[in-house]
Image: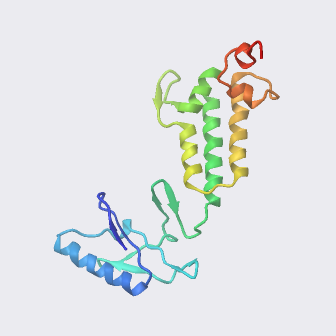
Amino acid sequence: MFNASPENDTTIIWSKEDETRRMLTRLDVLMSWCRMEFKPKKSRSLSIRKGKVDEATTFTVAEQQIPTVSQEPVKSLGRWYDSSMKDTRRGAETLELASESLLAINKCGLHGKFKIWCLQFMLIPKLLWPLWCLQFMLIPKLLWPLLVYDICSTTVEAIEAKINKYTRKWLGVPPGLSDVAIYSKAKTPNEIYPRGV
């Protein structure tokens, strides 16, 4: 299967090694005919034999060897591909990102409710406290890896517990207050428990 996307990316997927080499040779000739060239250093190859990554198989294009994903991992659509072909490392990285980001928000000189806003929109102070730079949003930044990778539920629960811990601290509520009370959209007890019910 040959796939050329409008961003000048090319993906070649073949079931046999010799067919892949033949296709790379043809593409190399075609690219030289168009007066263009491949950049093998920006390319990656991945060979799988019997369900495991094959390190011995290498491919060349433009008389240069294409690095394998075990030599240099590649990121595509927000997902990292490496030789392990597992997502366990990405779960630990997401947990570490959450911890570091929450600590950065906690250290800034804002009041509690503004820190909650930073949790949602991740404002990080640059140089001085009043000067803000909207760099990225923490919650969506954490949600993307959770959508892309297969991260175990215990890691997700650990991230949720860290966020809840800091949220309670910043709001100044007791640790025993339920999550429903914290994240409820109702503003008064009458809205939570309407009269006559």
Q: Position of residue 93 (x, y in %)?
A: 61, 52
Q: Please say if 58 is above or below 102.
A: below
Q: Nearer the viewer, residue 51 or 116?
A: 51
Q: How is the image coloured?
A: rainbow
Q: Please say if 46 is above or below 117.
A: below
- For the point 49% across and 37% down, the residue is 136
Quadrant, the C terminus: top right
Using residue 183 as the reference point, say whether residue 1 is left or right of it: left
Quadrant, the N terminus: bottom left
Q: Nearer the viewer, residue 50 or 134?
A: 50
Q: Please say if 179 is above or below 158.
A: above
Give the quarter of the image for residue 89. Answer: bottom right
Most distant residue in the right direction:
176
Instruction: Report whether residue 169 is seen.
Output: no
Q: Position of residue 2 (x, y in %)?
A: 34, 72
- For the point 56% across and 38% down, the residue is 138
Using residue 174 as the reference point, say whether residue 160 is left or right of it: left
- For the point 17% across and 70% down, the residue is 34
Most distant residue in the front direction:
196
Q: Position of residue 132 (x, y in %)?
A: 48, 26
Q: Please say if 91 is above or below 128.
A: below
